Image: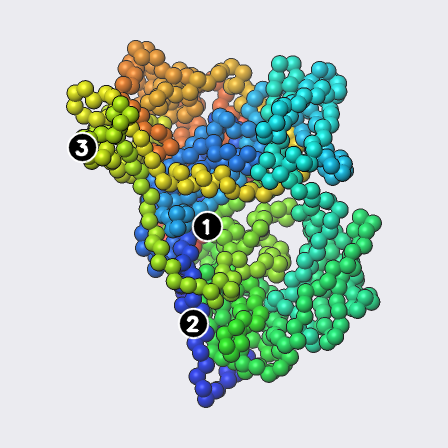
């Protein structure tokens, strides 16, 4: 875990006040309250990284998870991680799967559910430690699913206020053919809200049309429009959320953020403003007004950001007059204090010191604290008059902190966020054996991890190599960015058109001005009470019945997995526990349970897993926000890439090549399957194509050895629901020696994945893999943690031609 050292802050200016009366120990007081707040709201920081964020149905998702806990507050360690796949539009849970956690790390894989519709989804990862019946470790991962059907068209649905009437919401439909300018006569469109009968319209010969939905039928919880387009015996299903309450794009809002929190009469402050309409930033022409008279123009850019300097005069009223879309509105500035403190920090993204100016409109005693979610570092009481310049040295701490000015009664007067020790980064340098590669070519990579000062550091890392067109910029995340930024700030984009936020100091400075301290508000700290609720582990319980009646005596159970037997006991009530060791199986395998003895075939086995139920219920009730107004074809971004030679074949091309040839049947109740090349439980193609037939002979490579075996089937008894099992991670094989020899194209978008690799003591690591048959640009990503607890991030492009 990351460790933060508690140090004393030395104030160089002004000189500390020598008071005869000892001031209260503000830092100790706040540390006690912070500890109480953490005890009452225990939390693990869980971060999950995946191979990519754009998937197709029945494609494998690979992940690695890192858990950061405060051992002083959380004594127990999580042992199970559960992944819950939920559709953003319908909130339907499509998959749950559990994995073991060891040393606060977990890795695994699962197939994107076959029932997944194209669009936006989330995978919610949770640990098995509960407090007040909620997991204390949770991470929400956004993913996008593209269609993998060989359709001749896709559907674009568009919402826009310009299409709406007073009592109806307009939805524009457009079928986009794969053949340029192809006519689509006879195309039809079916739509309905939940609980309503489907309605159908015929589109014009260009595949376009309009529908209008009565606003009276749209309400929170029932605002999903279910649609299906029909053309030439092909169907395409797509869902879209409608606004339950009308949000007009013509409604402008402007929020103001004075540096430090408040405006004070007579003191000069920097004020940042943010203009938004329909949830998006907009450029605005505006003027600062004093008592209704123009004071100065304020420029608000295309990102919706602007700022100005103001020294408010007593008795005056201040507002901002903004012109946008031929409309003019006036927005009042926040209330102005008669008595208070203002702080100015010219640079909040700093290294070893923070320079600040503290202004006060009257002499007062203050103290200064710097705290994050775990520690509070404070100063003795300081006497200030009008303006005081203060320099605070910072040592051995990295990340976001809150600098708070408090009065002599420990009440907050002003607050500002900073990012400390910004340049104290770890570097991940990657070197490849050549600049460009051919298909099925050998890639040899050398990795060097160095810490601050260019000193080599031993580390543990996750490494992936993925086609660039499978990484959507708007959903990109990485271990370092999530831990330092997303973990501390609300509603923040880690990547945008300007690149990675962690590497953009000016944009990070802006974010620290706009965002407040999220996790612990001062009101929370002041009102912290004692919480005696304990952190508990979840359990998997079972109950026996026979002929649908309760059993009347204890029974012995046998558990069968991978040909091995385990024993257990059910008490006189038929109750039994399944421990984690019992439930741990190889990925794709099953666990069988039965009562031992003769004539014991009529028992029923009811299993309950509190972790499965709690996380599924929470996912169904989660609000993922209103999706983008325009729900365009799920192919658009990838279709653009088809025109770029360097990107190679896109997702649709890759999947169509196999989908047109095969129809998957799935695995049998034991988890046994035959891949599309006729191999039993194939390690290279872990996608069930059909069920094996008892008595047939199949080639197999399940144990890394090529053999021919006769399949004997599985008749070991009742199967425990797969949701309750704990699955070991599969090994990612990529283009191994078997696939390199075959003639069939392997259009892999993920060509390398290792969830946990260790460097040597000098921070060095070498690894190798082969490219597949998909040409284009790939991104090698390295992220992980050093032996000293520092985080690592590095990337390098790889080109296949």
Q: Nearer the viewer, mark 1 or mark 3?
A: 3
In the displayed structure, does residue 521 sit left or right of residue 604?
right
Using a 10 Å C-alpha cutoff, classify the residue at mark 1 as few (fewer than 14 neighbours), some (14 to 19) or many (20 or more): many
> Which residue carries the number 3 mark?
554
Using a 10 Å C-alpha cutoff, classify the residue at mark 3 as few (fewer than 14 neighbours), some (14 to 19) or many (20 or more): some
Q: Element type at marker 1?
A: strand
Res 181 visible: no
- Tag of residue 436: none
Decide: is 792 above or below 531. above
Q: Element type at marker 2?
A: helix
- Residue 739: where, in percent of width, then height? 43, 23
The answer for how far apart the CA atoms under marks 1 and 3 are is 54 Å
In this rendered view, identify the residue nearer to me: 653 or 662. Answer: 662
The answer for how far apart the CA atoms under marks 2 and 3 are is 56 Å
- Residue 614: where, in percent of width, then height? 41, 41
Which badge, 2 or 3, comes first in the chain's sequence? Answer: 2
What residue is rendered at 45% in x and 29% in y?
A: 111
Decide: is 536 above or below 771. below
In the displayed structure, does residue 397 sit left or right of residue 671?
right
Q: Element type at marker 3?
A: loop
- Tag of residue 792: 1
What residue is rendered at 28% in x and 15% in y?
A: 712
The answer for how far apart the CA atoms under marks 1 and 2 are is 35 Å
What residue is rendered at 53% in x and 67% in y?
A: 403
> Which residue carries the number 2 mark?
29
Q: Nearer the viewer, mark 1 or mark 2?
A: 2
**Extreme bottom residue here?**
20
In this rendered view, identify the residue nearer to me: 776 or 623. Answer: 623
Q: Nearer the viewer, mark 2 or mark 3?
A: 3
Using a 10 Å C-alpha cutoff, classify the residue at mark 2 as few (fewer than 14 neighbours), some (14 to 19) or many (20 or more): few
């Amino acid at each position: 875990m990351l460790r933060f050292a508690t140090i004393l802050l030395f104030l160089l200016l002004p000189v500390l006040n020598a008071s005869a009366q000892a001031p209260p120990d503000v830092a100790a007081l706040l540390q006690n309250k912070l500890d109480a707040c953490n005890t009452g709201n225990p939390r693990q920081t869980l971060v999950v990284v995946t191979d990519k964020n754009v998937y197709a149905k029945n494609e494998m998702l690979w992940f690695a998870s890192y858990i950061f806990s405060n051992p002083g507050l959380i004594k127990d360690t999580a042992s199970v991680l559960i992944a819950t796949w939920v559709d953003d539009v319908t909130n339907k849970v499509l998959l749950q799967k559990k994995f073991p956690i060891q040393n606060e790390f977990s890795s695994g894989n699962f197939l994107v559910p076959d029932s997944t519709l194209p669009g936006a989804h989330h995978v919610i990862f949770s640990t098995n430690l509960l407090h007040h019946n909620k997991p204390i470790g949770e991470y929400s991962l956004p993913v996008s699913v593209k269609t993998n059907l060989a359709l001749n068209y896709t559907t674009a649905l568009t919402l826009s206020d310009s299409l709406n009437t007073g009592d109806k919401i307009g939805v524009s439909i457009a079928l986009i053919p794969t053949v340029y300018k192809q006519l689509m006569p006879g195309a039809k469109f079916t739509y309905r809200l939940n609980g309503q009968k489907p309605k159908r319209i015929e589109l014009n010969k260009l595949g376009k049309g309009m529908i209008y939905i009565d606003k009276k039928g749209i309400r929170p919880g029932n605002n999903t429009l279910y649609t299906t387009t029909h053309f030439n015996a092909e169907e395409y299903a797509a869902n879209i959320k409608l606004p339950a309450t009308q949000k007009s794009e013509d409604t402008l809002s402007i929020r103001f953020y004075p540096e430090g929190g408040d405006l004070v009469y007579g003191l000069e402050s920097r004020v940042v403003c943010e203009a938004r309409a329909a949830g998006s930033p907009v450029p605005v022409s505006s003027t600062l007004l004093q008592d209704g008279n123009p004071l100065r123009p304020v420029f608000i850019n295309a990102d919706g950001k602007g700022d100005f300097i103001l020294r408010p005069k007593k008795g005056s009223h201040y507002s901002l007059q903004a012109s946008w879309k031929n409309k003019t509105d006036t927005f009042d500035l926040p209330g102005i204090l008669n008595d208070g403190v203002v702080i100015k920090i010219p640079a909040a993204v700093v290294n070893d010191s923070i320079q600040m100016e503290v202004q006060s409109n009257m002499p007062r005693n203050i103290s200064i604290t710097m705290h994050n979610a775990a520690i509070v570092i404070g100063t003795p009481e300081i006497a200030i008059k009008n303006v005081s310049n203060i320099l605070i040295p910072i040592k051995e701490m990295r990340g976001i902190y809150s600098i708070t000015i408090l009065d002599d009664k420990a009440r907050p007067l002003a607050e500002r966020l900073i990012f400390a020790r910004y340049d104290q980064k770890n570097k991940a340098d990657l070197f490849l054996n050549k600049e460009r590669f051919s298909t099925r070519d050998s890639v040899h990579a050398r990795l060097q991890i160095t810490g601050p000062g260019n000193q080599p550091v031993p580390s543990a890392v996750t490494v992936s190599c993925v086609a660039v067109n499978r990484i959507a910029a708007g959903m990109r995340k990485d271990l370092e960015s999530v831990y330092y930024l997303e973990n501390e700030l609300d509603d923040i984009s880690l990547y945008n058109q300007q690149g990675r936020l962690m590497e953009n100091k000016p944009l990070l400075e802006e974010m620290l001005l706009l965002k407040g301290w999220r996790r612990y508000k001062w009101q929370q700290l002041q009102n912290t009470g004692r919480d005696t609720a304990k952190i508990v582990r979840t359990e998997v319980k079972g109950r026996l019945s026979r002929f649908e009646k309760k059993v009347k005596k204890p029974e012995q159970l046998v558990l069968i997995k991978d040909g091995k037997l385990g024993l257990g006991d059910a008490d006189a009530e038929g109750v039994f526990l399944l421990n984690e060791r019992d439930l741990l199986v190889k990925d794709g395998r099953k666990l069988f349970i039965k009562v031992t003895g003769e004539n014991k075939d009529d028992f029923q086995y009811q299993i309950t897993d509190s972790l499965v139920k709690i996380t599924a219920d929470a996912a169904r009730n989660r609000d993922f926000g209103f999706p983008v107004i325009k729900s365009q074809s799920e192919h658009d971004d990838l279709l653009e890439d088809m025109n770029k030679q360097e990107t190679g074949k896109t997702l649709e091309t890759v999947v169509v090549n196999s989908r047109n040839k095969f129809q998957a049947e799935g695995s049998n109740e034991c988890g046994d399957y035959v891949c599309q090349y006729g191999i039993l439980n194939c390690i290279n193609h872990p996608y069930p194509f059909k069920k094996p037939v008892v008595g047939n002979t199949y080639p197999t490579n399940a144990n890394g050895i090529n053999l021919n075996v006769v399949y004997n089937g599985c008749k070991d008894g009742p199967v425990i629901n797969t949701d309750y099992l704990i699955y070991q991670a599969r090994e990612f094989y990529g283009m191994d020696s078997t696939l390199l020899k075959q003639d069939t194209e392997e259009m892999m978008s993920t060509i390398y994945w290792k969830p946990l690799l260790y460097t040597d003591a000098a921070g060095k690591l070498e690894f190798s893999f082969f490219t597949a048959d998909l040409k284009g640009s790939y991104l090698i990503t390295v992220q992980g943690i050093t032996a000293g607890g520092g985080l690592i991030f590095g990337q390098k492009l790889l080109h296949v031609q």
